[in-house]
Image (cartoon, rainbow, N blue to C red):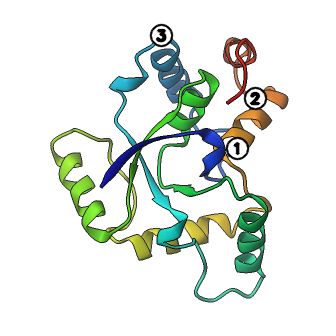
């Protein structure tokens, strides 16, 4: 398993908008803002070259929409597996996303072992890359649009669905 720091415009994020738990976002934000982002465990990602989140049976044209989106958004190279709150906080504080890149089923097994000893947060996903991709496809098929972590964070700022202190922090610095 590789560890890599990613830009938020390289990662396809989940559909939850805004993030589900504002308190968790505040905790991550404060950790990241105060310069302690490196204490957070890496965020699980699947490189798109390992597979796309596509449905096996697609009656509503989701697979086509996903492929078209990725074709138009060539900077997106990774799929966020888990960690929307963390990636949002990292983006708001202008940190890169410290990531663990899951390319094989052995990488997923390695993460499961790290979970047992508390080195990484629990990943609420299946145990194979293929099954994770199918789960993610089912998740994405319920939405109308896809976004990078950066795009979703900017939308949260524009819609003012996060606290002002987070918005001000993001706006004080140049973009990625």
Residue 140, picture quadrant: bottom right
Say which element carries label 1. Answer: loop
Q: Position of residue 37 (x, y in %)?
A: 43, 23
Answer above or below: position of 6 versus 22.
below
Q: Residue placed at 40% from the left, 70% from the top?
A: 129
Q: Check whether the beta carbons of the residues at disc 1 and disc 2 lie within 8 A of each other.
A: yes
| Dot 3 or dot 2, earlier in sequence | 3
Q: Nearer the viewer, mark 1 or mark 3?
A: 3
Mark 3 and mark 2: span between their CA atoms? 22 Å
Q: Residues within 10 Å of mark 3 (few under 14, many from 20)?
A: few
Q: Which residue is mark 3?
A: 34
Q: Check whether the beta carbons of the residues at disc 3 and disc 2 lie within 8 A of each other.
A: no
Mark 1 and mark 3: span between their CA atoms? 25 Å
Q: Position of residue 76 (x, y in %)?
A: 64, 55
Answer above or below: position of 68 versus 98.
below
Q: Is residue 175 left or right of residue 158?
A: left
| Dot 1 or dot 3, earlier in sequence | 1
Say which element carries label 2. Answer: loop
Q: Which residue is mark 1?
A: 17
Question: Which mark identifies residue 25?
Answer: none
Residue 67, picture quadrant: bottom right
Quick one: which residue is furthest to the right in this view?
158
Q: Residue placed at 33% from the left, 24% from the top?
A: 39
Q: Which residue is mark 2?
A: 161
Q: Dividing the image into 4 quarters, which one contains the N terminus?
A: bottom left
Q: Is residue 80 left or right of residue 126?
A: right
Q: Is residue 49 left or right of residue 110?
A: right
């Amino acid at each position: 398993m590789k560890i890599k720091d990613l830009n938020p415009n390289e990662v396809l994020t989940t559909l939850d908008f805004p993030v589900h738990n504002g308190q968790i976002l505040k905790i991550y934000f404060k950790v990241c803002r105060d310069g302690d982002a490196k204490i957070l465990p890496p965020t699980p990602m699947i490189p798109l070259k390992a597979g796309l989140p596509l449905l096996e049976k697609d009656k509503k044209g989701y697979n086509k929409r996903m492929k078209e989106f990725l074709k138009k958004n060539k900077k997106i190279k990774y799929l966020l597996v888990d960690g929307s709150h963390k990636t949002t906080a990292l983006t708001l504080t202008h940190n890169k996303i410290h990531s663990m890149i899951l390319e094989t089923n052995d990488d997923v097994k390695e993460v499961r072992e790290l979970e047992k000893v508390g080195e990484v947060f629990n990943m609420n996903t299946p145990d194979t890359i293929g099954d994770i991709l199918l789960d993610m496809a089912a998740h994405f098929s319920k939405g109308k649009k896809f976004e990078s972590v950066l795009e979703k964070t900017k939308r949260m700022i524009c819609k003012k669905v996060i606290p002002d202190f987070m918005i001000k922090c993001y706006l004080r610095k140049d973009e990625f």
